[in-house]
Each structure stands twice: as C-alpha cells, then as structure tokens.
Amino acid sequence: MRKRQSDSGPVLKDIAVAAGVSIMTASRALRGVEGVSEAKRHEILRIARRLKYTPNSSARSLVTMNSDLLGISVPNLFNDVFAEMLAGMRRTFDMAGFSSVVDTTEYSLEVELAWAERLLSWRPAGFILTGTKHHPKLSQTLRRSEIPTLQMWDVTDDPIDVCVGIDHVAAGRLVAERCIALGYRRPGFVGVSEGRDPRAEGRMAGFQAAFAEVSDAAPLCLTRSGDPNSFVAGRDGTAEMLACHQPDVLFYVTDHQAFGGLSACVAAGLSVPDDIGVIGFNALDLTTVLPTPLTTVRTPRKLIGTTGARHLLARINRIDVPRLVTLPVEFVPGATIRAQ
Amino acid sequence: MRKRQSDSGPVLKDIAVAAGVSIMTASRALRGVEGVSEAKRHEILRIARRLKYTPNSSARSLVTMNSDLLGISVPNLFNDVFAEMLAGMRRTFDMAGFSSVVDTTEYSLEVELAWAERLLSWRPAGFILTGTKHHPKLSQTLRRSEIPTLQMWDVTDDPIDVCVGIDHVAAGRLVAERCIALGYRRPGFVGVSEGRDPRAEGRMAGFQAAFAEVSDAAPLCLTRSGDPNSFVAGRDGTAEMLACHQPDVLFYVTDHQAFGGLSACVAAGLSVPDDIGVIGFNALDLTTVLPTPLTTVRTPRKLIGTTGARHLLARINRIDVPRLVTLPVEFVPGATIRAQ
DNA sequence: TTTGCATACGTTAACGTTAACGTTGAATTG
DNA sequence: CAATTCAACGTTAACGTTAACGTATGCAAA
C-alpha cells in the first residue's frame, strides 16, 4: 500500500470521517447539490473549512470529463487592444468560476496550435481565439469537438462555433470613403507586416478596394517596418514611404504607428492635414490627449469582450445564441484630416 | 457498466491495444521515459498520432499530484508594464511545457486570493505573484505549501520563496536626489491612489523621505485622480494640484500620467522645465517619441520577467537559486527637468 | 552449462472524485 | 393499518493514468 503524499492536506474522505458521514454525502454537501439536510451541510462545510480542505480538481475532472479551465489566445498584450478585450471578458468568467489559461501567439498559428493541444489535455470548458484564421489542424479539431469556441475581433461567414467581432474590410472601406469624400486621391497604408495580421490586411484590402473604384485615384502605396516599438515603426515606416512616394493620406495599422508617423510627416516638412492626412486605428486613450487630436476609428473592444464572454458562457450552458455578431465601428474625425 | 463518453477520443488503452503492447509500455513510450526499445517507441508514437490520441492531464495529475499549470497574477494588463514582464516570462514557460493561468487583480487582495484558491485545486507547478503584499491567508498557504512561488516587481526581506524585482523606495529616493541636486525644493507626487498600489506608495515614500532630509525643502504635496484613462488622470490630477499648491517638480506614478500632466502644466501657463519639472516612471516606448523627451526612470521589466522565469523554473526543478534579486533602475534625464 | 545482470516489458494497485443505484426510515395516503 | 412515497443518506464501480514491483529474455562471463 502506497502512502499518501504528505503535502496535499486532507481529502474528501478525511472530511467525511471527521463529520461522521459517507464520502458521497461530503461530496454532495461541498458541491451544494441536493440530497443533504441543511444541518448536515453546514456541519460539513464548517469542518472542511477548519481542516483547510482543498478539493482536487483533477479527480473531479477525471470523472466528469470537463473542467473550469478556459483557453484564451491573443496575439500579444501590448497596445491595450487585446488587453481591453481580455479585461472585458475576464471579469465575467471569473464570476462564473472559470480560470483563464492565456496564450500569446505573436501571430504564429503554430504557437497557437501547440498551446491549444496542450490545453486540450485538460478538457477545457471553452476556447476563445483571436481572429478567424487558425492552424487547419486546430480548426478541424475544434469543429469536431463539442468544446464551445469563441472567435473574436474579426468576423467570418463560417465560424467554428460562435463569433463576435468587427468587419475589418468594411472598416477599411469606411475610412477610404471618408477620405475620398474629402478629396484625397493618393492613399497610403502604413504598418502591415506581410502574412502576420489578417485583420490589418483586411483593413488594407477594404481601404484599397474603395479607392480602386474611384477613377482618378492613384494606386495604394505601402510600407512596413518591423521595429518592436510601434511608435518608432510608424515614424520610420512613414519616412521611408515619403522618400519614394507622394501620398496625400495615410491610413495606419494602429494609433501608435499613426502617432509616430505624425512626427515623421512634420519632420519631412509636410503640414498635417493640409499636405497630408493621417488616420489611425482603434481610438486608444492616448489619442485623446495628443496636442492634435488624431483622426481614427473607434473599435468596440470592451464590448467585444463582454458580448463574447456572455455568448460563450451561454454556449457552455447549452443555450442557443446567434453564431455571428458583427459590432459597429465609428469613424472619429480629428484634426489630422481636412475638415468637411 | 457505464459507457465511456463518446466525445473524448481514444485513451491510452486504445493505443496500447492497437500497438499490441501493455498500457504501461504505451505510457512510457508517449512520455519519453526509459524502458522501451526505440523501434517500439516509434511504432507507438505513430499509432498515437494516427488515432489522434489526446492525453488526459487530469488522470496524470491525479496520480502524480502535480500539473504543468502555472499561476500568474498581475494587477492589470494596461500600460504595457505588466504586459512586458509577462511577455518576458511566458516564452520561457511555454518552451518548458507549462501553461499559464492568468489573473488580473485590479489591486484587490481578495480577488487574488479567490483566484489562487481556485487554482490550488489543480495543484499548480508554481505561482507568480506581483508585489510582496498579499492576502494573509494566501501568504500563509503558500509558505506552508511546497509550491514554488515567485514574487516579482517589488522586493522584500522575507519572500515567500523567491523574489525578483526593483526597490521602489530606493527608486523614489534616486529621483528625489537628482531633483535636490538640481535645486528643486517643492516636490509634488501625482497619481497614487490610497492603499491600492504598494509599489507606487513605496516610490512616493522614498521620494518624500529624501526631500524631508533637506532642511529647506517644502513638505510633499499630493494628488490623485481615479479616471480610468491614465492620461486624463494625470492631466486632471495635475490641474487640481496646481490650483492649491505651487510645486516646482512633479513625480508621477507612471509615464502616462506624466504625459497627461505635461499638458496640464502648459495649460496652466507654466513653462517646463523652467517653472516646473516633470518626471515619469517606467520609460515606456511612448516617451521616446514625444515632442519633448520625458524625464523618467527606466525599469527592467523584461529582465524581471526573464530572470524571474529562470529562477522559478529552477525552483520547480529543485535547484537552488538566490531567494532575492534586486535589479537596478536607471534615471533617464529628458527635457522636462533642468539641465545640470 | 550455469550464473549474473542488464534491459524490456507486464500486472496490479492506487490517486480522489462523482454517477448510478440501493437502502432506510419516516411521513403520507387509501 | 398496510401501502406508497420520498428525502436523506450509503455502496459500488468506474474515470485514465502512473508508480512500484515482478517476470521474462538475451547475452556475456565463469
């Protein structure tokens, strides 16, 4: 007979013995399910507290075939974008008794796959993924499994399970249409790094497509910079572009890059917004305190988080919810594009 | 006899049967431990892949009494400070095969406690906590347990287990000494919210103590603002302070608040740095691209993450490491204080 | 041949919990 | 008063995995 490990403290049996009941009664009392008288339940809870009983989730999970673990995968936690979505959902899940197993993929599908496969061994209660493009193996596994899955921050016609996000292509179009109405005809897009961020590419595609429909518009000019500091990336990317092209409006992948780009425009002797328009994306807190308010697009990050959390929770409880929710974005005219 | 759940796919026994070996041999082969010939190991791995075998971590955890789950608790994920520490450590842990169960406490000890107690039921491999002040119940539990624990971002003489951080009191002193040398005598501190952030209070205490040792220095004036947008909080907090007091140098709780404060100073008709000095904290990316470079303190956030991760990993593997590591901070003179 | 001794496996008994079902005794009913 | 019902428990048998221990096989040395 093997000895029990000394470190783990009392188990259900110890509580049951101390309370003079069977293991099953103790289990029922601690879980708060029917079948135990109120008096006994209180007695058992009291004893469990006194003995500092810590339940063993592995044992529970082994027999119930599920867990209170929730997988959340985001590209990174900088720039507050994903942090805000996460904050929006984490509180909901915490209150519902779930723990969040977080991954940061750095836009690598392989990293996400490896993380998800590890997590699958714990039979998680649900998955929350950023975007709608994943490693084919992962999509397939999740579609086959019964595990509720939320895809957020982007939308698709064919979600794995449920999907709450914004239409990035439409957002790009929206920006382009505003620009076109203001007379801009030589568009530029700054900051998209090839094949990494499908959402950024979507915005660019929408932006470009809308301009392409205007007869006298110039083709889109592009640039990107890999600097990890996104302010610097925006500044350097813009400087590089201005050296070769003459765009009259620049749409940036994020506000941070737009802010960096602003200084590059000024440094190049261009006046904003007379010579060149500058447009960011996300409407981060930062933009509200800049000397010149940045033109940008407000994305409902917190709302995506809370809505997504609610819908996923509903799915976990086997309640029907709409499989696809597209939330609106809002164009925020600042001082960095022409007025009217 | 109860039927097996249909959704979970094959178990170890199915692999063993398919490979014509015993369960234990399959287990050894899949775990990569000794006692299986190379030929058989490859055969078993091939079959496991073909059958899409997913191991059951609960079952493993139940018998081994541990898991590959790692608890990480931070106050929040905004402002990039905690995000950078997290990024610094997460990669290390990922490569070592651990999954991160993340909590955001919003500076509430109760929230942290509740999260930790839930996680304890999974017998995590380790805990990573922000700061050195926790709910007494949690400190006690962790000290008693054998679970490796890292406290980061702050230091203490009596860590629970291992501790990697910076000395916030000394950092406050450092800033004050620079200010005093430059002739500043009327200090102000902006942004600390009472009883929430012990590190911020430490910096303030060091800042104040150093000034108190100078005979002709005025007492510290204080302000705080609860606005969730820290730029706005810095701006409004500063405006409020300037209405009642006449400090000649302001030390902010973060760079973001300092940036917001800068605009309040300008709006109040004060010239920076002639009338008033402005000093931030953290040396975030943002500060490098501001029109006037912000004076600030560079904190080794990424290094705290990587060092902490290494040390905790060592503890998990029962290797001895120093229990306390204090990393240095660096004063970054910008254009927002007097020169020499 | 025997002996010694690895290496490569198989068998069995836990690990802590819960689902399913069985039992009891008291209250309610005809 | 016997029959029925039902809440409140207890008993048994898994859940999937690993540790400990036992056994067989092969090979070299004696």
Image (spheres, coloured by chain):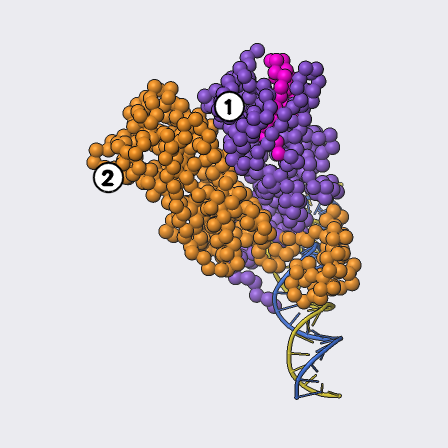
Chain colours: A purple, B orange, C yellow, D blue
- Magenta highlight range: A169-193
The quadrant in which residue A1 appears is bottom right
Residue tagged 1: A268
The question of residue B240 being in magenta is answered with no
Q: Where is residue B282 in the image (x, y as percent from the top left)?
A: 42, 37
Q: Can I make out residue A125 in this image?
A: no
Reply above or below: A154 against B313. Answer: above
Q: In this view, does A8 lie above or below A265?
A: below
Q: Where is residue A255 in the image (x, y as percent from the top left)?
A: 54, 27
Tag 2: amino acid:
Glu
Secondary structure beneath dot 2 equals loop
- Residue count near mark 1 (Cα–Cα under 10 Å), binned few <14, some 14–19, many ≥20: few
Say if A151 sits above or below A179 in the image: below
Q: Quick one: B292 or B63, which is closer to the camera?
A: B292
Q: Numbered disc 1: what chain?
A: A
Describe residue B149's horizontal placement relative to residue B206 as left or right.
right
Asked if the residue at tag 2 contacts the one at tag 1, i.e. Cβ–Cβ closer than 8 Å, the answer is: no
Q: Report in which chain the residue with disc 2 lies.
A: B
Frontmost of labels 1 and 2 is: 1
Q: Position of residue B320 (x, y in %)?
A: 46, 59
Disc 2 crowd rating (10 Å Cα; few below 14, some 14-19, many 20+) is few
Q: Residue at x 46, y 30 (%)?
A: B289
Residue hosting label 2: B213
Q: Distance between the residues labelled 1 and 2?
A: 49 Å
Q: Which amino acid does label 1 sit on?
A: Ala
- Extreme front residue here? A244
Q: Quadrant of the N terminus of chain B?
A: bottom right
Q: Which residue is drawn at 71% across and 18% down?
A: A213
